[in-house]
Image (cartoon, coloured by chain):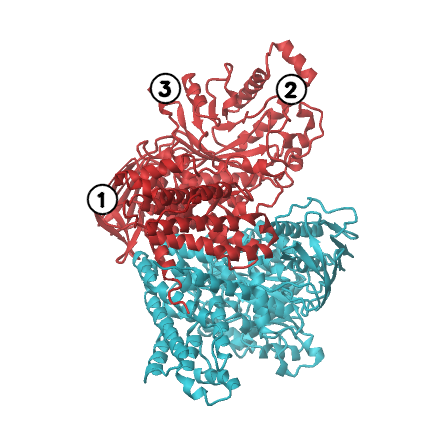
Chain colours: A cyan, B red
Amino acid sequence: MRTTPFSVALLLLSALNSLAQEPVTSDLSFQHRLMPVPATLRFQPGRLNVDSAFRFRVDGYNDARLLAGLHRIQLRLERRTGLELPVVPSSESPVGGLVIRCSGPGKTVPSVDEDESYSLDVSDSGAVLKAPTVVGALRGLETFLQLLEGDAKGYFIPAVSIQDKPRFPWRGLLIDIARHFEPIEVLKRNLDAMAAVKLNVLHWHLTDDQGFRIESKRYPRLHQMGSDGLYYTQEQAREIIAYARERGIRVMPEFDMPGHVTSWLVGHPELGSAPGPYQIERKAGIMLPAFDPTREETYKLLDGFFSEMSALFPDAYVHIGGDENEGHQWTKNSQIQSFMKAKGINDNHALQAYFNQRISKTLQKLGKKVIGWEEILHPDLPRDTVVQSWRGPKSLAEAARKGYDGILSAGYYIDLVYPTWQHYTVDPTVSDSNLSEQEIKHILGGEATMWGEWVGPETIDSRMWPRTAAIAERLWSPSHVKDIDDMYRRLDVINIQLEELGLTHEKNVDMLLRRMAGTENIEPLKTLVSLVEPVKEYRRTRARPATVLTPLTRLIDAARPDSRAARRFAALVDGILSDAPDLLRNRERIESTLKLWRDACPMLEAMIDRSPVLREAEQLPRDLSAISTAGLEALSYIVAGADPPAKWREDKLAMLEQAAKPKAEVEFAIIGQVKKLVVLASELRNLRSLPHSEWRSRVLTLSGKGTP
Amino acid sequence: MRTTPFSVALLLLSALNSLAQEPVTSDLSFQHRLMPVPATLRFQPGRLNVDSAFRFRVDGYNDARLLAGLHRIQLRLERRTGLELPVVPSSESPVGGLVIRCSGPGKTVPSVDEDESYSLDVSDSGAVLKAPTVVGALRGLETFLQLLEGDAKGYFIPAVSIQDKPRFPWRGLLIDIARHFEPIEVLKRNLDAMAAVKLNVLHWHLTDDQGFRIESKRYPRLHQMGSDGLYYTQEQAREIIAYARERGIRVMPEFDMPGHVTSWLVGHPELGSAPGPYQIERKAGIMLPAFDPTREETYKLLDGFFSEMSALFPDAYVHIGGDENEGHQWTKNSQIQSFMKAKGINDNHALQAYFNQRISKTLQKLGKKVIGWEEILHPDLPRDTVVQSWRGPKSLAEAARKGYDGILSAGYYIDLVYPTWQHYTVDPTVSDSNLSEQEIKHILGGEATMWGEWVGPETIDSRMWPRTAAIAERLWSPSHVKDIDDMYRRLDVINIQLEELGLTHEKNVDMLLRRMAGTENIEPLKTLVSLVEPVKEYRRTRARPATVLTPLTRLIDAARPDSRAARRFAALVDGILSDAPDLLRNRERIESTLKLWRDACPMLEAMIDRSPVLREAEQLPRDLSAISTAGLEALSYIVAGADPPAKWREDKLAMLEQAAKPKAEVEFAIIGQVKKLVVLASELRNLRSLPHSEWRSRVLTLSGKGTP
């Protein structure tokens, strides 16, 4: 009978736990957990207790939006602490509560010119939040809630003085509901999440080849024939706009054209540049259909449509897309070719510029400003157009030099499954762009983009969060806030807090695994899925001939970007590498972790035998077994101080190279770390001749760059 | 360095896993996983493969409701298997698919008289579902989906022949959204869950002291002043009714009166029997306010209100409540007393009967049948009224003898946190009631009741499911289906399948624990919460002066009824008790389980120190440590075959008695099992003189009845 079955597991857990939790001390060295980090903040000794005597009070300007925002914060505070506070904010001077002093309502419609600044002062005796606008007050309330801490004495807010305002006025999240439709409750909970990290633009990608998702009362064939019945009614759109406004968030609609328009053409083939008929597109990728920019019928319908949409969407901007149109159908259409000759239009890019000018005029007449993807840049582009960069930061700098406002999305493509740190290091103002101060002001901010090819209501949250919180910080916080380790420390905290808003990014992982396995006993599968990531970039689309109707319920859908378990294992391995010459640090934890992985494998194989949906993953347990065994062998050589046999290193590195290849469209995120252990074990003899301080960098060099 | 950290954990997991998963063989002894069990079913050798060639086809009667239902089943099948099937049902004869042969639409409005029967025949070459009505076909489709199995060869449906129909025509679930409001998406997902287990009545408890939750266009002060803004618009009510109808579910509204009406009186104090003014009630319990049944104004408003509601709700029945009114305000009101004297009404019960008769007449004129709680039984009660029993089955039998139809809810009060088996053993036709066959026909079925005092949107699913599935089986399946072990085996399966419908009963447990702990590392807390249950009956209400505004985010809210972990531990303990005289069976698993519990304790204490919301639970880790240590000591005596020291048993039993007492309003569900181990260890000497077959029963007797 074994006597120590779980103690090592608990030891490990305890260690992981301590990575996530920081000691709380109320002094100047206080390590806060705010995201985004405020512009300036200074902690002081002291704490404001939060108990059932705590009260909120509005002092000065007050309106329904502020009260509703305060009510939401109060509910979240109550749910987090279990405290029950009075329904209505206090009208008396609270002792030990928060007073909100707001100067006025701010803009009637959420605007890029809104003042979002606030200040927050917390002491032992109370807290004061000051803001010139309601939106500023809402931003400050989110900060206040993020400040909540708990210890053996109870809940409290540490004493602090904060002056805060955003670095960029345009901080957006694009949600593409054309490729996969998302019900309004999905949008609502994500608007709450956006507000929690101070994002202020929902870029609503409403139409694309795969779906026309907004009701048009004027041209009902658009949504009726182009959406499979999956569209938002105008009433629902108003509901979303109001919901966003309550949270100080703009809703900017995108109607992508002249390409990406297949779904329009199902009901209105006469707008197309090829004869039709058209079907709703089911595949992902760049499609041929495009509006015919030479026919007046096209502009007549678009004039009417934009007039309807401009009334529906109060935001100052309308996004007209403009991306990925090569004009293949234009080239093949003789009538379009004649038109171009007659007008002296030289190429397809110029024809698109002609189209954009006409559309821009329409929108200008409707009182709207135009924004489009970087392809719209053309000498004829009206000067008040905003350019959204998606292929790289160069176009943004180019646009700024030409006097166009711009926002950055290149580098913030969260659908590409890159790790958080990679997005975090992307700055809208590229340092080597040589822009003047005046030109830099044209850079309004940026947007994370959640393209919808591979996300559905059950998985979209896990593809957006928590990574988008780090992008939100990049766009709000001063540029000097860029410590990656510290970002991850705070990201782990906000990650859990986001669940309070109904987000499913954490809880749906286990749910999907239970569904696949058909049982609640999913521990080995959880272990596996925690160590893999979906394939990056567009490799999923290339890997199999799937459509947007393919169920998103496979292992890849449960797997999440930026494996947390891999990140923690990397920290353990870095610990042992840094502990030359003894190499004692983290040894036990590394060993127990590797054994956990190894021992999951036989059970995984049994699960796969019962669940055909897991069959595609059958190689993964074998790979995991080989990976963890290699790590354990390496560790045993390190412990023994003995050289591995000849060819051991070569064999193991070859195995790791095979194991690193994607299977079932997921890839292990731990290969590079095990590689380091293998290199360490087989290099020990050589390392002994080096200074101890050089061991780590030597192993890293030998392990190779570019290792996952 | 330890070398076997997780293998025992995995061994345990594997063992638990095998309890949940059954071997799949396609022959007559096939152990199916259907819930509710069909009226008759016979498995045969053979299997129908389910792969990407699988097709659904409708042959014969077809309508939008059937197609939509089929589409939902197809989506669930796709999501469970990862297969992508064509969007539209096949029009050609499918090879190896399911053909649906439906004879007609059935009732236009879901009705207690609906024919819900169907037959399903599955062979190697295909499946045929026959039903006289669309609702019957929908019921059969749910069975078809439940039949899905998987093994190393792929997904399949075992060959089977099923003829099925419900035992009772009225199989309901009451959801009280008055005490805590539930958004319509909560109702929708639960309607899906109801359909999955073939329930057919949503009893919508719309008004009570704590809230008036339906929009009245005629008397808007009712919802405007009685709901805190938390009510359903009439459009939303229609949406729910349509959603339910699509799934063959009736929606029966309840307007509880003449008691339970505080929320009405906030806007209409003139209807009350005491002067007012009234406030929305925040506490749980039986309140004094009641309509004044002696004033014509009362009937005038109710006539108008019922006329409006009768148009809104198409169901044949309107529930008028009638429970828990003692008429204290009537007794104190001299005008009411004079009225009673003048009319010769002798007591409050008779006055309520007078009220009920008037209301009944109004509803009859509106074409509605009346249903009420058992207190409405009175000689003057119109004969076509339905009686809902809540205090016990006797009133149901009494009503049946008097010729009233009735439904049972006593025994199905899921808000009282009883284990599933307890509800499962309650039968609407009480065996000792001596009802004639004719009288028994008056018993239409039953309803589970989800009273809303202690549930919110985040927790209501976990209070309803999976237990309600077992009640659904009691009401659908033949009375001979009553094996409790087999029910639990199937319940574990349906439990996971219910998550496909968006239910949060599983996933919100961890979510709540993460919120409390403020971290994703919640393993020790998960262990603790898996071993406790919320206090039963009305003890939560009595334990602390909470209101319906108190956050439902404490440990008790994460804890679930009918601890699965305790059930599995009980099976392990029963195994060792049944293995006399060696007592070897399950030894290792019992030991590793007890150690897991014991070792969670230090980490739990650290978590509590960081999370004040957990402070109330600080005694629980200490108790758990003592409980598991007692179990381990017992096991070591059993292993050694040695007698424990004097007083050991006495000490341990005293400790267990203390540990059994609720703390933080939860109680351990494992005490009884550890008690058995303590008794076994200390009785070994005496047991050896008994026949081996008697050891188990002797220990059970000595461990005492009524142990949790």
> Which chain letter goes with mark 2?
B
10 Å crowding of disc 2: few (<14), some (14-19), many (20+):
many
Image x and y of residue A379, in percent:
62, 78
Foreground pick, A570 / A207: A570
Question: Is label 2 in a helix, a strand or a loop?
Answer: helix
* Whether residue A208 can be seen here: no
Image quadrant occupied by the N terminus of chain B:
bottom left
Image x and y of residue B24, in percent:
26, 50
Does residue A475 sit above or below B516 in this rendering?
A: below
> Which chain letter goes with mark 3?
B
Disc 3 with disc 2 on a shared chain: yes
Residue that label 3 marks: B435
Residue that label 1 marks: B29
Question: Is label 3 in a helix, a strand or a loop?
Answer: loop
Image x and y of residue A656, in percent:
37, 76
10 Å crowding of disc 1: few (<14), some (14-19), many (20+):
few
**Counting residues from the N terminus, which is met first, the one under dot 3 or under dot 2?**
2
Foreground pick, B380 / A183: B380
Left or right, residue A143 beside residue B255:
right
- Mark sitting on residue B330: 2
Which picture quadrant has residue A531?
bottom left
Q: Tag 3: residue type?
A: Leu
Foreground pick, B196 / B593: B593
Does residue B435 sit above or below B7 in this rendering?
A: above
Left or right, residue A25 beside residue B489:
right
Foreground pick, A42 / B524: B524
**Counting residues from the N terminus, which is met first, the one under dot 2 or under dot 1?**
1
Check whether the beta carbons of the residues at disc 3 and disc 2 lie within 8 A of each other.
Answer: no
10 Å crowding of disc 3: few (<14), some (14-19), many (20+):
some
